[in-house]
Image: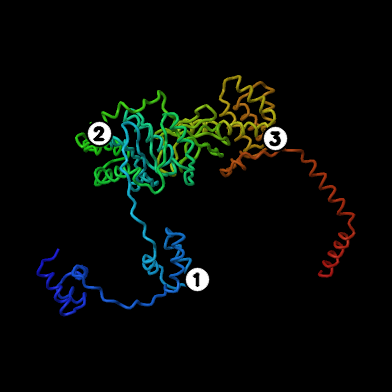
Amino acid sequence: MISGELEAKIRLLLTAERWPVGTIAEQLGVHHSVVERVREEAGMPRPARPPRPSLLDPFVPFITQTFEKYPRLCASRLYQMVRDRGYTGNPDHFRHMITRYRPRRAAEAYLRLRTLPGEQAQVDWGHFGKLRVGLAEHALMAFVMVLSYSRMLFLRFFLGARMPSFLRGHQAAFAALGGCPRVALYDNLKSAVLERSGDAIRFHPTLLAFAAHYRYEPRPVAQARGNEKGRVERAIRYVRTAFFAARKWRDLDDLNRQADVFCAGQAADRRCPEDVSLTVGQAFELERPTLLALPDNPFDTDERVEVNVGKTPNVRFEANDYSVPHTAVRKTLVVCASPDIVCILDGNEVIATHSRSYDRRQQIENPQHIEALVAEKRKARQHRGIDRLRHAAPSSGALLAAVAERGSHLGATTARLLRLLDQHGARELEAAICEALAHNTPHLAAIHHILDQRRFARGQPPPIPVVLPDDPRIKNLVVKPHALGTYDTLNVKADRDHDHDPDTDTDTDSAHTEIQDED
């Protein structure tokens, strides 16, 4: 508002002096809109200005015809259409100019919707930023349910807005309210509506099963009808300003504990819009008896995912690896995950249970799984050693059986025999084992003594241990010995062929001739 004296001065300058609006605003220190308002109130006409030519002028007929057919067509699509027809202007300028030609819609009036106690609840998600857990970043989502009659509020925060969290929010809300409304009103969110074409709606089958279990009707709001779910939208706005703003919390559990206190305290102490003489908490106490009773058994909201186990005994779930018994490799298992526990099933049998991690790239292991795998690997190494001994020295099987009857340790005996095999060779070890069995002395000391006697009789020095690299393909390599007479046969045959080869004889004679000539 301006004073009457200033307004009179503006009128004087407009009518008598005929100053422009901008000059008056600059000289008197007011905004040009104030001068224009005074001129309009005085009934003075706006001076006519010749229209400035624009690049859009040739396309105005096309734009008006397009808006008659598609009044809600967005500016970006219309810009592409006129650009294809030769428009060379800037998109921002185009978006500003077409506001003159877009048809104005008449303001729509809405009825005030009233519901009966226990009849309806409105449900929606609210996004409250990001929450980092280790290396993972999750969307912090608030599940909000509001009873339409009493405005009683339920609030629960989750990491993400997936279907299991959506159903758990319902369960927690029904438990906190002590009952279930007859109708739950949803926006067209993906957790409720998979597909919609006009009045044809395809609900999410899991939500339909959940609603059938609790005996309520899921109902989506009409498109572009914000008044039908205004209660939950105002509740989310109320949560942002009255609860979440400037709030400190340690983790998600602490935030949800504070949310419960807020709903039962500050939110319940508000005035009820349906009856201002009551608070929301008092109106809810009147509404509680009208809610539907809850079933005895809760709906199963655990996540179930099929996973394939590779050659390592672990399964991948939500970018984390959970260990399983080594007997489950190369199988298809089922991960059943609750908010706190991850169970891994092979058919109907639970083979592993872990605490759930909301981080990523983590290795969650059960020490018993690792110990069983290590024991199996040791057992496998022992079997490979026995197999190598049997190939190199067939009599080692009888020796190990006798060692077992005497109660000695098979693992240590196998390891010592493998070292003797590396030092003395397969033929000597086989001979020593046969001699020890013949003298009924099946123990390592006798085999050591026999090998030393045989080596001393041949006049050989003590064997030097052979150090091999840590490669199981080399350490476990088995070479089967065979008679060396075959090499003698090959040598004799090669000499015979050499004697009867005329080319070889000629070369030999030539070589002798060359040597004589040099001499």
- Mark 3 = which residue? 427
User: Residue 108 at what x, y percent from top left?
Assistant: 34, 51
Q: Distance between the residues labelled 1 and 2?
A: 62 Å
Q: Residues within 10 Å of mark 1 (few under 14, many from 20)?
A: few
User: Residue 52 at what x, y percent from top left?
Assistant: 35, 77
Mark 1 is on which residue type? Arg
Check the image and report above or below for 227 versus 182: below
Looking at the rendered structure, the secondary structure element under dot 1 is: loop
Upstream in sequence: badge 1 or badge 3: 1
Q: Nearer the viewer, mark 3 or mark 2?
A: 2
Is 275 situated left or right of 106 in this image?
left
- Mark 1 = which residue? 85
Q: How far apart are marks 3 and 2 (CA)?
A: 87 Å
Choose top left, top right, bottom left or bottom right for residue 116.
Answer: top left
Choose top left, top right, bottom left or bottom right for residue 125.
Answer: top left
Tell me which residue sits at (61%, 19%) in the image: 405
Looking at the rendered structure, the secondary structure element under dot 3 is: helix
Choose top left, top right, bottom left or bottom right for residue 330.
Answer: top right
